[in-house]
Image (tube, rainbow, N blue to C red):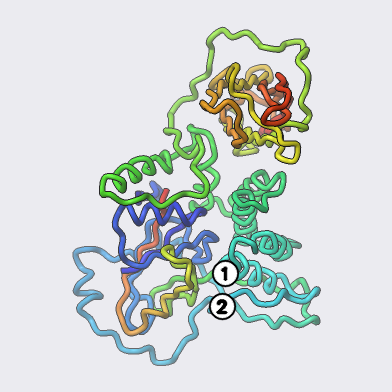
């Protein structure tokens, strides 16, 4: 028995294996190099490496595969794919895109964490011109991997989603790619919660006296959220906290905010999930001040648009000051009669931030915009 | 957990998409940027399984189906979401 798991984050696969006591080899195919478009798929491969059955039936697998002896193929056909297991030198300046794609793949798979930056650049070169959908998807995977790494660059998450959406538009039957977007998308689009098994897995592993595999990136709200059949708009009366904009602005001096809607393009009446990722500016030694009111996000949706929570309040941790990344998520729904076109949704965050651990603490507002495109 | 995609698409139809082998391309300075991109590996009954090397989830080392030559393999492709 052998497994290949389609998973952006390999450590989540390791936790899954630990929980389920999977002691057979499992390979991680973050880039979907295998090219499968749905899971699960079972493949019976004979002793000569030849595929004999795809999705064999349980009742007949013994007779049709396990109890049979297969003859070697009459001629040795070279299997598709390649056998590189280490990154080589970069291709030459005028090398074909195919060479850059192979180099990007090798850097991504075998180059270690420090190779993610060069891997992204190689994927970008490999996706130049008119890239096929698979190359576009893999570039998105690389952007997301860089976003999750210390080499993160501003806009990496947005670029990842952009490329996944572009790939899916070219091949809407590719459900591995579709799931990558739904993982971060609105509850209306989700077929299942995705990572709701993680708390259960950790509890089960601890109950066995083991330590759960640590995760480099904890799943966020979208990755746990339960799917819903109908959008639930927040219609409770609420008072806008700073309607006239009197609170002093933070223009990124203290907190950097990356705002993104997933998906970026929606049909009229469809929903999108807003992600606000907020990081204290470490170069300026900025800290969250946790002694006062909760962090608050207020959104002013265009006429006819709904929001599922307003305002969004983020409870503060117990430490007096902290520097963690804060992720705020909420969902928006466009009106059923929305006209096609680009829509800008304004929002702002209000928070207390300190200039240093013992520095002056200030109450600041930061304005953000969410770009959503309505497409029929 | 392993979940089945609620799709009308059969796995075989999605996997049997025709495609050429990932052709080796010489890393020379005279190639053009217009060379056709490699097609994805193909899983097709009667053909060798693609010679992909992927990281082992346990330790990150490269492994391939070819490592199991001489033994029958039941390969399960799944997702952890």
From this viewpoint, which residue is outermost toward the bottom?
A: A74
Residue A266 visible within the image: no
- Residue nearer the viewer, B35 or B16: B35
Residue A31 visible within the image: yes
- Res A110 label: 1
Q: Is residue A17 left or right of residue A180?
A: left
Callout 1: chain: A
The quadrant the N terminus of chain A occupies is bottom left
Q: Quadrant of residue B40?
A: bottom right
In the image, residue B58 lies at what x, y percent?
41, 64
- Depth check, mark 2 against mark 1: the one in front is 1
Residue pictured at 70% horizontal, 19% vertical: A363
- Residue nearer the viewer, B25 or A57: B25
Secondary structure of residue under mark 1: helix
Give the residue at mark 2: A84
Q: Is residue A364 left or right of residue A183?
A: right
A122 over A263 or under it: above or below: below
Secondary structure of residue under mark 2: loop
Number of callouts: 2
CA separation in Å, label 2 and label 1? 9 Å
The answer to whether mark 2 and mark 1 are in CB contact below 8 A is yes
The quadrant the C terminus of chain A occupies is top right
In the image, residue A282 lies at what x, y percent?
70, 39
* Mark earlier in primary sequence (2, 1): 2
- Residue nearer the viewer, A55 or A310: A310
Callout 2: chain: A
In the image, residue A81 lies at what x, y percent?
53, 76
Q: Quadrant of residue A251?
A: top right
A137 over A268 or under it: above or below: below
Residue pictured at 68% horizontal, 33% vertical: A372
In the image, residue A314 lies at what x, y percent?
55, 24
- Residue nearer the viewer, A78 or A260: A260
């Amino acid at each position: 028995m052998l497994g290949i798991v389609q998973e952006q984050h390999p450590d989540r696969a390791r936790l899954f294996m630990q929980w389920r006591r999977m002691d057979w080899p499992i390979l991680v195919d973050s880039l979907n190099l295998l090219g499968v478009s749905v899971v699960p798929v079972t493949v019976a491969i004979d002793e000569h490496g030849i595929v004999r059955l795809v999705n064999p039936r349980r009742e007949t697998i013994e007779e049709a595969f396990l109890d049979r002896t297969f003859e070697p193929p009459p001629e040795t056909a070279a299997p598709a794919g390649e056998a590189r297991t280490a990154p080589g030198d970069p291709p030459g300046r005028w090398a074909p895109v195919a060479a850059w794609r192979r180099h990007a793949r090798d850097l991504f798979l075998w180059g270690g964490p420090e190779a993610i930056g060069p891997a992204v650049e190689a994927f970008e070169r490999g996706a130049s011109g008119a890239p096929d959908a698979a190359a576009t998807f893999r570039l998105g995977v690389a952007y997301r991997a860089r976003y999750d790494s210390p080499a993160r660059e501003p806009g990496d998450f947005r670029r990842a989603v952009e490329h996944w959406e572009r790939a899916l538009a070219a091949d809407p039957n590719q459900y591995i790619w579709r799931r990558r977007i739904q993982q971060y998308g609105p509850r209306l689009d989700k077929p299942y919660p995705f990572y709701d098994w993680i708390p259960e897995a950790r509890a089960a592993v601890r109950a066995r006296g083991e330590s759960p595999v640590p995760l480099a990136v904890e799943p966020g709200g979208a990755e746990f959220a339960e799917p819903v059949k109908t959008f639930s708009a927040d219609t409770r009366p609420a008072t806008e906290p700073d309607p006239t904009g009197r609170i002093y602005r933070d223009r990124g001096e203290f907190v950097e905010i990356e705002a993104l809607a997933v998906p970026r393009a929606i049909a009229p009446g469809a929903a999108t999930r807003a992600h606000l990722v907020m990081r204290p500016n470490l170069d300026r030694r900025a800290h969250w001040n946790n002694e006062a009111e909760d962090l608050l996000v207020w959104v002013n949706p265009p006429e006819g648009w709904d929001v599922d929570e307003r305002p969004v309040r983020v409870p503060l941790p117990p430490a007096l000051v902290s520097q963690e990344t804060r992720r705020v998520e909420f969902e928006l729904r466009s009106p059923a009669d929305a006209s096609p076109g680009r829509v800008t949704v304004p929002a702002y965050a209000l928070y207390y931030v300190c200039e240093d651990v013992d520095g002056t603490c200030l109450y600041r507002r930061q304005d953000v915009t969410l770009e959503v495109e309505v497409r029929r | 957990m392993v979940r089945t995609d609620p799709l009308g698409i059969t796995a075989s139809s999605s996997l049997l998409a025709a495609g050429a082998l990932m052709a080796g391309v010489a890393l020379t300075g005279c190639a053009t940027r217009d060379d056709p991109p490699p097609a994805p590996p193909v899983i097709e009954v009667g053909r060798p399984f693609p010679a992909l090397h992927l990281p082992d989830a346990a330790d990150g080392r490269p492994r391939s189906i070819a490592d199991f030559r001489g033994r029958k393999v039941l390969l399960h492709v799944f997702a952890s979401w």
